[in-house]
Each structure stands twice: as structure tokens, then as C-alpha cells.
């Protein structure tokens, strides 16, 4: 899916006001509209779309004091493609007359905490109206009292505005887009059994399907941009260094055979990109239907085993698409799930839309206790790794951004939105990635898997959507860090599984309770074989997004003070996680 300024949702700001003319309303007009403009300026300066462009805000043409003005605002927002609604007010207003009743659009209200006028009273009244009418809204209210003329946005209000806006934009950007399944179910993996009800009712997305034979057809009939292919192949030969070939002599391919495989995996990359977003160059070549693509904001490739038993695997294609650069330079990453694990594809999509960063698709492969590591290597680990580590590793499809070769101003390893990545950082990611030949036991058709080791010291958040019969989708997440192991320890552990694949050593932040009482419990409670992670601790934003979509959170280690859900969740009981489940069940999927 090509995201452009013309199809990205805007944030709508609704300045509500006391409707009593004859002195009251007139005295508040300037302050109320100024509050809306302050929020607009703050959001446009601090938020960007996945394209790198500044987020756009739309303010109602007038303050909203009565229902007619609320309706006029709704009409304007519909014309302006508003996908997120924020109401602001410093005063009392007529609650149920002025609230935003537009369905499916995430809503928040900032009631100014000042003593001169009862903004907090309106906030409470309006939220009660939202709750009674079954239209959840988020409450934003400063901890400290402000002076009436104070135009600053308090830091706690800023944090909630950003958390709400990021999550709301993610909801709106997904709506109407597609998840493209290339192939079907891979090796019985439940996540690749595509649940259309989940996509349609919870995410507002379409499901598109293409058989993997379509890739073969396009390769055989040269249905791809020939000029781009030549450019891509030359770039691949220059920057993608082959790694070790661990296959036995009897099954190793010749140099000529390997060269043919390189040509095919590059073509696969171009073709899968075209399947997702389309390509006008194909129309010029006489392939009008193929030029359209499938409007896919995320996709998955089945690969195993109906493809990989006789064709090169999709590791190169998936890794390059998932990265923030290719032969055309630095660009936005695509969301391409290995083994067509659509649920992990959605987990990647959530992380991408909240952070604008590439996502690492991984197996949650092995828990290594400190005792097991010492038994195998003779080394007793200390520090973050002292309580054990989780080995995150997949067959080579992880984004190259996951090498950790990008840096912040202090030189710390990070993953960045594509517009902040430098040419030097791009080249470091490539230099620190090798491409070993695929192991024949796994992939009879050959291919090339990315091989790298993620730098330690990065804060990361891993997440996963699972579907539970009788409940529906649930989200689990774990904030933690990538860690460095001594070189000989890494090699000893890595070589016990498959050293030709990319590795991240992950340590979750422990709370001492439940699933986070120790590292083993995190592994034991993870609900599937896959997970997705990226840079930063953004679990609180994932929780906010999940509540907007009515997806309960079954496992997290976010500080409870940072959890931000609609105000009506408080009416579903005093235990926060149980209330989350009850509220999501009560309201049902966002688009049902």
C-alpha cells in the first residue's frame, strides 16, 4: 500500500464552549479557540505519518456550543478525512449536545484544569454521556491546576495527547486497507489460518489472497520492472555478501546454480512488492491488472513447504521488504510476515504504525537459564542476562534494521524511522549482515537467509496477537532489552540451533509477579511460536491501541500508571485487566 498525504487521516480538534449567549459564550470564545490551536501546533510539531510528513490537524470552523454546531463539525471532519477526534474545552458545555457521536473514530476530551471555569465538570459530564451511549472516549485532565490564561500544555497532558493520537492514527490508517496472503497455511501454523472476522470487524481491513503460483507466473512471463530488476540485481551483488554454506558436499549447489537462485530471489522481491502496492511501470508494459496491486498495508508469504521444497525460500525477499532500504535507497519498510503468519503480521503492523520503525519478525525460540548457560559454556552471566535470556531467531526474514547498527546522538544502538537513517547507517546494516546459503534440510529449493547478531543495549518491545476461541483476539507484550553475550557464549548457544539465521538475545523487564516473575515465565506464557519487536518501550501505546480496537491485553509489564484506556473501562470493575476483558466484550469489535 502506497501511503500518501492525500490518503492519510487527519486529527480533528473540536473546541467546545458554554452555549449561553449574552456574556458567557462571548467571554470564552478566544480562550477556547486558542486552546484548540495550541493542541494543533503541538501535535503537528511532534507527530509524523509513516511517510515522514508532519501529521495534519483540522479545527472546527467555530466553537461548538450546541448540537447544530456539533453536526456542522462532523460534516467538515467527514469531508477532511478526519480519523481521530480530540475535544478541548476550558469551561462548562452542554454535555450530550456537544460530544462527538461519529462511530468508529477514536475520541478523547481534554478538560482544562482551571478554577475560573469548570472544564473538569464538562469533562466528567461528557464522559458520562459517552459511557451511557456506548461510545467510549478517553479522558485527558491535568494533574495540576492551571491559571486561566495559561496557554501551555502540561507535560502529563502532552503525554496523553501523544499516546492517544498515535494510537488513533494507527486505527484510522489501517481502516480500508488490505492484508495480502501470498499462499495459504504454512506447516499448520495457527497464525497463518487467516481469520477474516478478526481483520474485518476488529481492524476494518480487507483480506486479499494470491496463490504462490502467481509468483512463478510473473517470473516466467517477466511481469516485473525489467530496469528495476537489473538495478536490484547489481545492488544485491555489491552489497549482499554471501555467508558460509553449511550444507553437506553432496547437496551444495554450484556457483552457477547459486547465481540463478540470486536472480530468482531478487525477482521474488520485486514481484511481492508489486503484489502489495501495485506498480505503474507494469501498466506501461501492457500488464494493466497486475499494475493495480492489492492495496496491502501488510502481507504474508507462506513459503513452507509447497514453495520451498522446490523453489528458493522467501527469506531474502522478506528481509529486504521489511527493511528501511533497498536498491532504491532509504525508504519506508514494508510489513511482510514469514510463513504467512497473519497474526504476527498484524503485530508488526501495530508496532510500525506506532513507531514508524521497521519491525523484527522472530521465533520465540529458546529460554536459556543462567544455570543452563553455565553448564553448556562454563560462563556464569551477570547483569541483565544474569536471570537468563530468550533466544529470538527466525530463518532469516528479520529486518536488517534489527542489526542495531543505527545510532542515536550518544552512539547508542537504535532503530529509526526511515527519514532519520543516514547512508552510513544503511551501509553498516548491510555490512553487518551476511547471506548464507539456506540449509537443505529446511529448504530443499535453496535460497539465502540473512545472518546477523543484534547489538545489545537497545530497549525493545515484543508483541503478539493471538486468537482464543470464545474470547477472540488478545494482545500480549513484553518490554525489555537486547543484550550482548560474550562472543564464545553466543557462538556456543547459536550453533546449537542454526547459526545461519539472525539472532537477538532478549531479556524482558521483570516485575516479580505473574508472567513476569522471571524470564522463564515470560517464555512459558508466550502464546505462539512467533513475535514481533522493534526499538523502544512502547507497550503503553500498544495497550491504548488495543483498547480502541476492543482487543483485551492478556500479558504486559507496563507500569500501571502509564496505562491509558477509555474512561468507561473504570465502570467495568476495579481489577484493571479483568475490566479490560469485560469492556472489550461489552462493546465488541470496533467495526462489528
Image: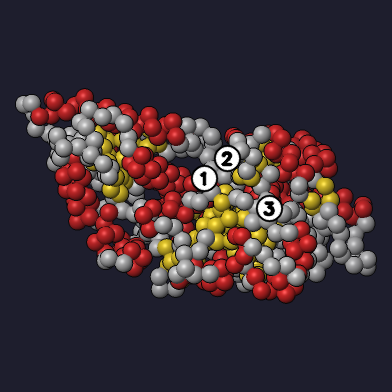
Residue 548 visible, this orientation: no
Against 90, residue 200 (above or below) is below
Provide the residue designation for mark 1. 355
Res 454 label: 3
Q: Is residue 173 left or right of residue 246?
A: left
Q: Position of residue 587 (x, y in %)?
A: 30, 61
| Front of the two marks 3 and 2 | 3
- Upstream in the sequence, badge 1 or badge 3? 1
- In front of the other: 495 or 189: 495
Q: Residue at x 19, y 56 (%)?
A: 132
- Upstream in the sequence, badge 3 or badge 2? 2
- Colour pattern of the rendering: secondary structure
Q: CA distance from mark 1 to mark 3?
A: 19 Å
Res 417 label: 2
> Which secondary structure, mark 3?
loop
Q: Residues within 10 Å of mark 1 (few under 14, many from 20)?
A: many
Q: CA distance from mark 3 to mark 2?
A: 18 Å
Are dots 2 and 1 in contact, CB under 8 Å? yes
- In front of the other: 573 or 330: 573
- Upstream in the sequence, badge 2 or badge 1? 1
| Total residue callouts | 3
| Front of the two marks 1 and 3 | 3
Residue 106 visible, this orientation: yes
Tell me the quarter of the image containing the N terminus: top right
Q: Is residue 510 left or right of residue 443?
A: left
Q: Position of residue 32 (x, y in %)?
A: 22, 30
Q: Position of residue 160 (x, y in %)?
A: 36, 45
> Which secondary structure, mark 1?
helix
Tell me the quarter of the image containing the C terminus: bottom left
Q: Residue at x 76, y 58 (%)?
A: 487
Q: CA distance from mark 2 to mark 1?
A: 7 Å
Amino acid at each position: 500500500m502506497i501511503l500518501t498525504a492525500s490518503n492519510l487521516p487527519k486529527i480533528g480538534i473540536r473546541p467546545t464552549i458554554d452555549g449561553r449567549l449574552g456574556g458567557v459564550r462571548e467571554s470564552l470564545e478566544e480562550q477556547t479557540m486558542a486552546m484548540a490551536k495550541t493542541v494543533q501546533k503541538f501535535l503537528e510539531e511532534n507527530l509524523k505519518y509513516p511517510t515522514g510528513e508532519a501529521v495534519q490537524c483540522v479545527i472546527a470552523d467555530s466553537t461548538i456550543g450546541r448540537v447544530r454546531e456539533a453536526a456542522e463539525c462532523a460534516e467538515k471532519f467527514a469531508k477532511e478525512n478526519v480519523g481521530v477526534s480530540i475535544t478541548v474545552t476550558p469551561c462548562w458545555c452542554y454535555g450530550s449536545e456537544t460530544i462527538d457521536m461519529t462511530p468508529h473514530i477514536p475520541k478523547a476530551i481534554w478538560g482544562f484544569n482551571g478554577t475560573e471555569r469548570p472544564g473538569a465538570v464538562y469533562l466528567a459530564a461528557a464522559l458520562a454521556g459517552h459511557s451511557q451511549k456506548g461510545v467510549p472516549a478517553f479522558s485527558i485532565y491535568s494533574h495540576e491546576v492551571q491559571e486561566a490564561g495559561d496557554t501551555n500544555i502540561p507535560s502529563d497532558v502532552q503525554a496523553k495527547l501523544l499516546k492517544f493520537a498515535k494510537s488513533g492514527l494507527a486505527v484510522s490508517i489501517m481502516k480500508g486497507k488490505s492484508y495480502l496472503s501470498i499462499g495459504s497455511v504454512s506447516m499448520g501454523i495457527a497464525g497463518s489460518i487467516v481469520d477474516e472476522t478478526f481483520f474485518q470487524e476488529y481492524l476494518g481491513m480487507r483480506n486479499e489472497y494470491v496463490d504462490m503460483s502467481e509468483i512463478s507466473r510473473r517470473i516466467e512471463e517477466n511481469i516485473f520492472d525489467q530496469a528495476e530488476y537489473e538495478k536490484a540485481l547489481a545492488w544485491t551483488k555489491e552489497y549482499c555478501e554471501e555467508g558460509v554454506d553449511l550444507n553437506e558436499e553432496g547437496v551444495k549447489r554450484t556457483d552457477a546454480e547459486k547465481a540463478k537462485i540470486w536472480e530468482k530471489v531478487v525477482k521474488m522481491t520485486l514481484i511481492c512488492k508489486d503484489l502489495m502496492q501495485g506498480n505503474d511501470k507494469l501498466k506501461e508494459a501492457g500488464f494493466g491488472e497486475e499494475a493495480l496491486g492489492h492495496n496491502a498495508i501488510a502481507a504474508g508469504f507462506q513459503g513452507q513447504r509447497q514453495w520451498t521444497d522446490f523453489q528458493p525460500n522467501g527469506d531474502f525477499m522478506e528481509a529486504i521488504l521489511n527493511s528501511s532500504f533497498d536498491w532504491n535507497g532509504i525508504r519506508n519498510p514494508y510489513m511482510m510476515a514469514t510463513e504467512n503468519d497473519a497474526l504476527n503480521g498484524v503485530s508488526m503492523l501495530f508496532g510500525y504504525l506506532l513507531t514508524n520503525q521497521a519491525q523484527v519478525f522472530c521465533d520465540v525460540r529458546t529460554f536459556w537459564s543462567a544455570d543452563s548457560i553455565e553448564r553448556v559454556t562454563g560462563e556464569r552471566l551477570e547483569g541483565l542476562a544474569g536471570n537468563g535470556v530468550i533466544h529470538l531467531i527466525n530463518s532469516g526474514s528479520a529486518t536488517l534494521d534489527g542489526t542495531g547498527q543505527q545510532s542515536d546522538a550518544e552512539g547508542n544502538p537504535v532503530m529509526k524511522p526511515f527519514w532519520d537513517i543516514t547512508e552510513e547507517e544503511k551501509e553498516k546494516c548491510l555490512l553487518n549482515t551476511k547471506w548464507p546459503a539456506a540449509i537443505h534440510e529446511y529448504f530443499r529449493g535453496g535460497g539465502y537467509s540473512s545472518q546477523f547478531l543484534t547489538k545489545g543495549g537497545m530497549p525493545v518491545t515484543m508483541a503478539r496477537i493471538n486468537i482464543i476461541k470464545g474470547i477472540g483476539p488478545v494482545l500480549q507484550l513484553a518490554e525489555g532489552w537486547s543484550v550482548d553475550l560474550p562472543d564464545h557464549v553466543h557462538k556456543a548457544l547459536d550453533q546449537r540451533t542454526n547459526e545461519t539465521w539472525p539472532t537477538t538475545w532478549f531479556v524482558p523487564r521483570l516485575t516479580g509477579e505473574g508472567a513476569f516473575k522471571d524470564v522463564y515465565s515470560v517464555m512459558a506464557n508466550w502464546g505462539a511460536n512467533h513475535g514481533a519487536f522493534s526499538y523502544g518501550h512502547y507497550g503503553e501505546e500498544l495497550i491504548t491501541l488495543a483498547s480502541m480496537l476492543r482487543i483485551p491485553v492478556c500479558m504486559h509489564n507496563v507500569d500501571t500508571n502509564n496505562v491509558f484506556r477509555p474512561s468507561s473501562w473504570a465502570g467495568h470493575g476495579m481489577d484493571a485487566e479483568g475490566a479490560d476483558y469485560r469492556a472489550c466484550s461489552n462493546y465488541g469489535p470496533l467495526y462489528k
